[in-house]
């Protein structure tokens, strides 16, 4: 008895998943912050790029529970990377925002990641770089589903 051959879509899904995870792992390594978890960095980056958010909004954006995000924010706050401030309209609501140190940390990590990726892309042929450029909108479309 032989196993069924995967369909072209199944093979593409497997190959794309594996390549995406490997690339994401390599980019995470470039962050070079051993005292911060990936979840903490992701939350801090979300605040850096999207501005102040309530805890529930940040948890939803990062697809974690509010209690989990509260622990993450507590660690970031203790490290001086985020601050909590009362909402100016609804005083019951608390907004979380990146501090200048938090924003600087995210920007430095992204510069390291971009530099590593630029170097890796420079080793490819112009045709391969063009193929990747054409794939970017498609990858965003898949990620946004």
Image: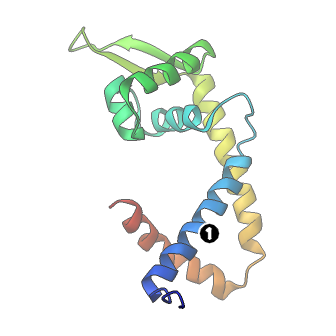
Q: Which residue is drawn at 46% across and 80% down?
A: 10
Q: Residue at x 59, y 27 (%)?
A: 102
Relative height, residue 63 to residue 101 (above, below) = below
Which x, y percent locates residue 33? 73, 35
Q: Which residue is drawn at 72% across and 28% down?
A: 35
Relative height, residue 31 to residue 90 (above, below) = below
Q: What element carries label 1?
A: helix
Res 54 visible: no
Number of on-image labels: 1
**From this viewpoint, which residue is outermost toward the front?**
1
Which x, y percent locates residue 127? 64, 88
Which x, y percent locates residue 61? 37, 40
Which x, y percent locates residue 113? 69, 52
Q: Which residue is drawn at 49% across and 71% down?
A: 136
Tell me the residue that label 1 is attached to.
Answer: 19
Quarter of the C terminus within the rendering: bottom left
């Amino acid at each position: 008895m032989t196993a069924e051959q995967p369909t072209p879509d199944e093979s593409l899904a497997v190959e794309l998943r594996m390549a995406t995870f490997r690339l994401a792992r390599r980019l995470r390594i470039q962050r070079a912050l051993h005292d911060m978890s990936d979840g903490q960095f992701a939350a801090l980056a979300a605040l850096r790029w999207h501005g102040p958010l309530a805890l529930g909004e940040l948890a939803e954006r990062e697809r974690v529970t509010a209690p989990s995000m509260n622990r993450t924010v507590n660690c970031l706050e203790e490290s001086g990377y985020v601050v909590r401030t009362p909402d100016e309209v609804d005083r019951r609501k608390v907004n979380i925002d990146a501090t200048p140190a938090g924003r600087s940390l995210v920007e430095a990590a992204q510069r390291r990641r971009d530099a590593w990726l630029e170097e890796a892309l420079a080793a490819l042929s112009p045709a391969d770089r063009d193929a990747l450029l054409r794939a970017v909108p498609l990858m965003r479309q898949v990620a946004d589903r």
